[in-house]
Image (cartoon, rainbow, N blue to C red):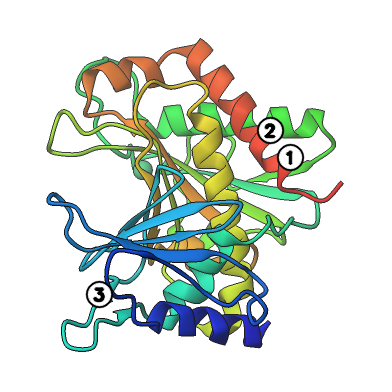
Amino acid sequence: MRKIFSAFITILLFAVSGCSCTRLPEDIYDLPYTVFQENTDAVPERLILKNERVTLSFTNGRTMLHCNGMPVFMPDKISKDSKSGKWILPERSVKTVLFTLMSPPEKLKGKVVLIDPGHGGSDHGAPLPFIKGVSEKGLNLDLALRLGSELQKHGFTVLYTRTSDRKIRLDKRGNAYKADIFISVHHNSAANPYAAGFEVFCLTPQAPERFTQLRKSVQLASSLQQAQQEVTTSRGRGIRFANFQVLRDARCPAVLIEAGFLSNREEALRCADLNYRKRLAAVLARAIRENVLP
Ligand SMILES: [Zn+2]
């Protein structure tokens, strides 16, 4: 595995010059792909990596890449050295994000899912200015219970950090039970009333010994992000990385979903709609099932 990674890094550090397609030797890489640079007036320096699974598109100086059109906000910026023309990306992003996106899915093992409905009790979560009597903590709990019930129908053991409206300390969530998968459920808010869309967070990679766990988290995040597109018209806001305590504490593949912006009127109304939550829970549960070895 280490050999593949170092080869992979070498590719990224490979000087890509001109705008023609550069075919790299296939026999030294377990993940064959083509790499080329696309120069347009709008985006003068864009790097494309392509294999049979995905096309990844990077822009010099940005953390965001597009994976088959889905935005992924890497933990690090990709940059092109102006003198040498080499593309540089820190190893942790290569090992956790790029490798996962380009590889065949790494299936999860085990069927114990710990679901964490965000907030609760005196902690109401994000404000919901458009609908009276509804709060983020309540929507989180409802969506979490529906997701859990869908998974139970398919033989999963589901544990929850809370099943009622009560406050749970952050340090009693991610590590609350021994589980195979951890999912924290939240709804979003922003000062910009037009901000909209579903987001999935994974832990910012730090400790290399946890990279395997993190790659599985990224794989799960990618499946959840793609699945939610079936039930919403908002553009998915993609996969992101953050140092959230619940993700840090979890000792299994772990993601935190932000299921929609309660500060956006249209999206708040949709999130508060029971039928929408039922459909969302069903597609998210299917994405989890498909990620687990039979
Ligand atoms: Zn929240």
Q: Is mark 1 within 8 Å of ligand 1?
A: no
Q: Position of residue 124 (x, y in %)?
A: 33, 37
* Nearer the observer, 50 or 141: 50
Q: Residues within 10 Å of mark 1 (few under 14, many from 20)?
A: some
Of labels 3 and 1, earlier in sequence is 3
Mark 1 and mark 2 in contact (Cβ < 8 Å)?
Answer: yes
Secondary element at tag 2:
helix
Residue ID at (25%, 26%): 128
Residue ID at (57%, 60%): 102
Reading the image, the residue beneath label 2 is 286
Of labels 2 and 3, earlier in sequence is 3
Using the rendered image of the protein, determine whether residue 192 is visible from the camera's viewpoint: yes
Question: Could you tell me how far apart the alpha carbons at marks 2 and 1 are, in whole angstroms?
Answer: 5 Å
Q: Is residue 257 left or right of residue 60?
A: right
Q: Position of residue 222 (x, y in %)?
A: 53, 48
The label shown at residue 79 is 3
Q: Is residue 159 left or right of residue 89?
A: right
Reading the image, the residue beneath label 1 is 289
Question: Could you tell me how far apart the alpha carbons at marks 3 and 1 are, in whole angstroms?
Answer: 37 Å
Residue ID at (81%, 55%): 110
* Nearer the observer, 86 or 66: 86
